[in-house]
Image: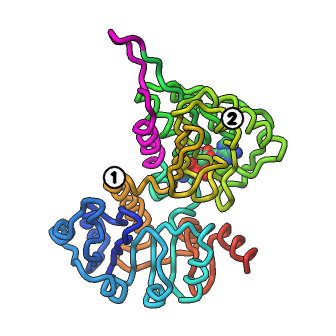
Amino acid sequence: MIVGILGEGSTDRRVAITPEHISSLAALKAEKILVETNAGLAASCTNEEYTAKGAEVVSRDAVITRSDMVLCINPFLKKELEMLKGKVLIGGFNPLINKDFVADCLETGVSVFSLDVIPRTTRAQAMDILSSMATVSGYKAVLVAATHLPKFFPMFMTAAGTITPAKVLILGAGVAGLQAISTAKRLGAVVEAFDVRTAAKEEVLSLGAKFVDVEGAVEDKAAGGYAVEQSEEFKRKQQAAVQEHAAKSDVVICTAQIPGRKAPVLLLKETIGNMKPGSVVVDLAASTGGNCELTENGKTISVHGVTIIGDSALASGMPGDASKMFGKNILNFLKIMIDKEGKINLNWDDDLITGTCIAHQGEVKNERVKSVMSVNA
Ligand code: NAD
């Protein structure tokens, strides 16, 4: 089996597999490992480092045409997918949103596995790229906020007077939100957080942050640990509570998401108008509409003196460790997909193989992706 690693182009600095993972790939009995020229450069992984670990650095075309299995991060063009007919492609393709890409995969006959829809079970944790990338984004969001904020995060008692600590509000206490809480606490801020899942409360409190309760949230165990759409009444109550807390905050980090849906709008235009000039909003939900009504995806804007940063691609801003984590998740997944002889083994009785498969012989196996595709058929 020949394994190929593609570069991500100029819009993403990460790479799916770093040089330190090459020997682990070889240990899975990959007979050859091909890496696209300069695939890892933006993540500080040189061609020479890949070669030194035993990989062959070749053109993008050569990776696509010679490999039996291709590893990457983002979706790519249909004309390249066509060259992968009958082969296996693994990455993180956001299939609940990128429906055209799923349709292309089905049409071109590639077997595609997207690790961002892996079932949220204990066994899947080591392969969960969403958690890994959310960890990076949550951390980075706080650092970005700190560099834009015109004041310190920690409290200081100096000869020039006492500096009060920054107040940070985190919307959504999933993986990114919890990492943002830890990072902001480490920097000395006073932190509070909101979430609609009751399980999040204990986690927020255990990190030393305050949990802001809004009664009446709906939960659904069948949603696999994810949040679900809330009632209009709850949304109004929540927006009012967010308004009250945001007005007292220096920084708001927005991480609230519902898989495959538009992000909930929690910070209204009026709320931004009530925030202190100089405050910073970092909206990680920007690519799905944003938690802030004024967020512009991929842009940093200033409204009434409040800086609003719309960035859902913060993991790409820390490409070294983000790539290491991504690569380790893929390697753990390959351990269940490659047999002892080094052959690809698609065991459809394995919920992690079925649960990540977004295209195989023209069929979607993942149930959530299947229902999204049938709605749009
Ligand atoms: P996510 O990225 O889908 O959403 C981020 C957070 O936003 C979630 O905590 C969600 O509850 C919250 N949210 C959604 N709507 C909201 C609203 N209107 N107001 C406030 N908050 C709102 O979530 P995630 O980070 O991927 O994690 C979701 C859950 O899955 C967590 O419990 C996490 O611990 C769990 N998880 C389990 C595994 C596993 O078992 N393999 C792996 C990763 C995460």
Of residues 58 and 245, the one nearer the viewer is 245
What is the tally of numbered marks visible in this picture?
Answer: 2
- Measuring 64% from the left and 48% from the top, which residue is drawn there? 291
Q: Mark on residue 9?
A: none
Q: Quadrant of the C terminus?
A: bottom right
Picture layout, residue 183 above or below residue 165? below
State left or right for residue 170 relative to residue 1. Answer: right
Q: Any magenta on residue 226?
A: no
Q: Position of residue 233 (x, y in %)?
A: 84, 42
Please report the bounds of the magenta region as a residue range: 135-162
Say which residue label 2 marks. Answer: 242
Picture layout, residue 165 above or below residue 53? above
Q: Amino acid at mark 1?
A: Asp
Q: Any magenta on residue 155?
A: yes
Q: Gap in Å between the C-alphas at discs 2 and 1? A: 33 Å
State left or right for residue 159 relative to residue 334. Answer: left
Q: Position of residue 115 (x, y in %)?
A: 50, 65
- Measuring 62% from the left and 47% from the top, which residue is drawn there? 256
Other-residue count near label 1 (Cα within 10 Å), few / some / many at <14 / 14–19 / ≥20: some
Say which residue label 1 marks. Answer: 321
Of residues 321 and 276, the one nearer the viewer is 276
Q: Nearer the viewer, mark 2 or mark 1?
A: 2
Q: Amino acid at mark 2?
A: Val
> Who comes first in sequence, dot 2 or dot 1?
2
State left or right for residue 18 relative to residue 152. Answer: left
Picture layout, residue 179 above or below residue 129? above
Other-residue count near label 2 (Cα within 10 Å), few / some / many at <14 / 14–19 / ≥20: many
Quadrant in the rendering for residue 29: bottom left
